Image (spheres, helix red, strand yellow):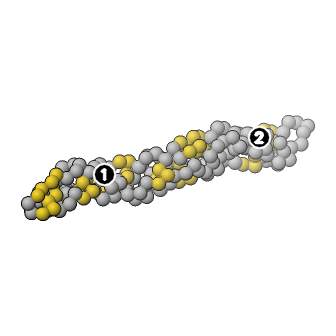
Amino acid sequence: KCPVNYFCPNSTVKYPCSSTSLCPEGSTSDNSCPAGYYCPPQTGQNFTCDLGNYCPPGSTAQTPCEIGFECPTPSDQNECGSTYFCDTGTIEKRKCRPGYYCTDSTSEIICDLGKYCVEGTTSQANADCPAGFFCTTADTIEQCEQGSYCPPRSTRQILCPSGFYCSSDAV
């Protein structure tokens, strides 16, 4: 019988397996470690790759899913796209969180005060809290109450000065 880490195409010849191959006892060919598994060198064994890791064919160790990618299974690694954020080890991509913006799938940046960033925001350039509203945080928006006014980028209501009238949508 052919020993571990060797393959024997016939009963008289024995060849060493490559370091990225799976060659258990009795192997007749040099088999690449399958996708979704890793095969540590010189073991002749394969191990299931854990979720959040990526193991393409020929893996000798688990590799965490790269930042900017999602790995729904250990044998698949897919780019996330610009409105999504995928940290290292991501199993399922998710939209950039409310209150943050994602310029690409590798960074999630908190929006500045006075901004209103909804889920999936890719830039805060056009995310000013609108006139007539105030945003206490970058993911909270409230309408200005009558007797107050809220110019663009307001983080709080401003009481209408004495002698002036401010409707609920006043700027």
Q: Position of residue 167 (x, y in %)?
A: 86, 47
Is disc 2 surrounded by few (<14), some (14 to 19) or many (20+) residues within 10 Å? some
Report the amino acid beneath label 2: Pro
Q: Is residue 80 left or right of residue 127?
A: left
Q: Nearer the viewer, residue 103 or 133?
A: 103
Q: Position of residue 152 (x, y in %)?
A: 77, 40
* Marks 1 and 2, the one that precedes in the sequence: 1
Q: Position of residue 134 (x, y in %)?
A: 73, 44
Residue bearing mark 1: 59
What secondary structure is marked by label 1? Answer: loop
What secondary structure is marked by label 2? Answer: loop
Is disc 1 surrounded by few (<14), some (14 to 19) or many (20+) residues within 10 Å? many
| Residue depicted at x 55% and y 51% | 81
Residue bearing mark 2: 152
Report the amino acid beneath label 1: Ser
| Residue depicted at x 30% and y 53% | 58
